[in-house]
Image (tube, helix red, strand yellow):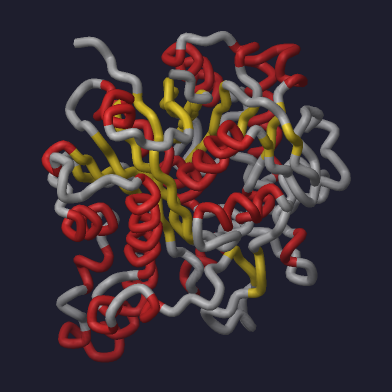
Amino acid sequence: MTERRVVITGIGAFTPLGKTAPDFWNGLVSGKSGVRPITHFDTSDYPTKFAGQIEDYDSNNHFDRKEARRLDPVTQYGMIAADETIKDSKIDLEKIDKDRVAVLIGTGIGGMKTFYDQSISHDKHGPRGVSPFFIPMLIPDMPAGQISIKYGFRGANFCAVSACATGSHNIGLAYDSIRHGQSEMALCGGTEAPVWEIGIAGFSSMKALSTRNDEPERASRPFDKSRDGFVLSEGASMMFLESLDSALERGARIYGEIVGYGFSADAYHITAPDPEGNGVHLALTNALKMAGIKPEDIDHINMHGTSTPLGDIAETNSIKRVFGDHAYKINLNSTKSMTGHMLGAAGAAESLATLLSIYHGTVPPTINLETPDPECDLNYTANEAEVRDVKYAMNNAFGFGGHNTTLVFKKFEE
């Protein structure tokens, strides 16, 4: 069977930097930070007191009170982003074949708040204190399930889980579903809601988080010499994919095209990156091969760039290894400098940023890059967005467990 071209016709975002895709993009290009002191809970006893948090969120503005009580925030955020994406795609829900619409939406952790709250209730009240909705609210596949139920999409429906590579894995698998003919359309991406007591405590215990409490907006600083850890964040981001034939037939606006991906494993350590970068090298080279392009065709890479001492260097070295001298001609960036690290939603949000860089011809900056690490010497688009024609761009996303993903996006040309 001839492989089909796959395009993006709808987008949505619910992030600390903006609660819609346009607001998210405007925040990125303006170099705005979405990192603030945590208000979800009292942080007095916590070494890190800030995060990329959805501010002024009231579930009652999106769901009726009864429904909201039965949905963990991770599902709520995903459903909000999905609704925007479907509306943006302008599909007619009454005319499409819903048997051919896939929903592939992941979360790295799942219903963390539900797990925490129900554990406390169980400790206080015993088995009778546990809600009958505990398991449905907790499990990671529920955002995909709830969205499928809401819109009646009966195609492939699941949640690939790979820590911080989750969002990208789900986009790649949705792309496969369409290009091989199993689906005609797909809603895909990631959602995460980890900014709660147990989430901050867990990552703090690992010494993974920045503790720059006196200036949280400057805490996420990828590639900077003074970086001291990542910033935990929450939110969701989605894309609506469809075959090119379907998009052209209905006259859809096309943001861009997906042309390949590379998936790999470090096979090295549960949390630390492989210092040799073998897994990342494999993901990058496999992505180029699937896309049928050369390293010098790449104009932009949205890096994983978490603002950790080891990770930023390892990723930089892998890019140098794959791209050689051309690495210095690529506009790189880390949008985590503005959003923080959205874990299972990170790859989805950063893929959206990559896509919009192509669509608008502008590469958002890496903010807070004031004193570059000598070992990070590439062009990270420091502090100010750069207008540039972008034909091919990549997004990298890597996860605990050694999971690596690279997606390749292309400017649409009919």
Instruction: Give the quadrant of the C terminus.
Output: top left
The residue located at (56%, 36%) in the rendering is 354
Q: Position of residue 100 (x, y in %)?
A: 16, 36
Quarter containing the N terminus: top left
Depicted 66 relative to depicted 74: above or below: below
Can you say whether 122 is above or below 83 in the image? below
User: Is the residue 341 above or below the residue 298 in the image?
Assistant: below
Left or right, 40 with respect to 116, comes to right
Q: Quadrant of residue 384?
A: top right
The answer to whether residue 352 is seen in the rendering is yes
- Relative to residue 322, is residue 411 depicted above or below? below
The x, y position of residue 406, in whole percent, is 49, 28
Q: Residue at x 53, y 68 (%)?
A: 54
Position of 234 with respect to 316 (left or right) is: left
Foreground of the two, 45 or 26: 26
Q: Give coordinates of residue 361: x percent, y percent.
A: 65, 33
Total of numbered circles in the picture? 0
Q: Residue at x 57, y 84 (%)?
A: 42
At which x and y percent is residue 15?
52, 60
Q: Is residue 204 in sight in this rendering?
A: no
The residue at the far right in this view is 371
Please name whichever residue, 391 or 297, is drawn nearer the observer in this view of the structure: 391
Task: State the residue at coordinates (78%, 30%).
Answer: 379
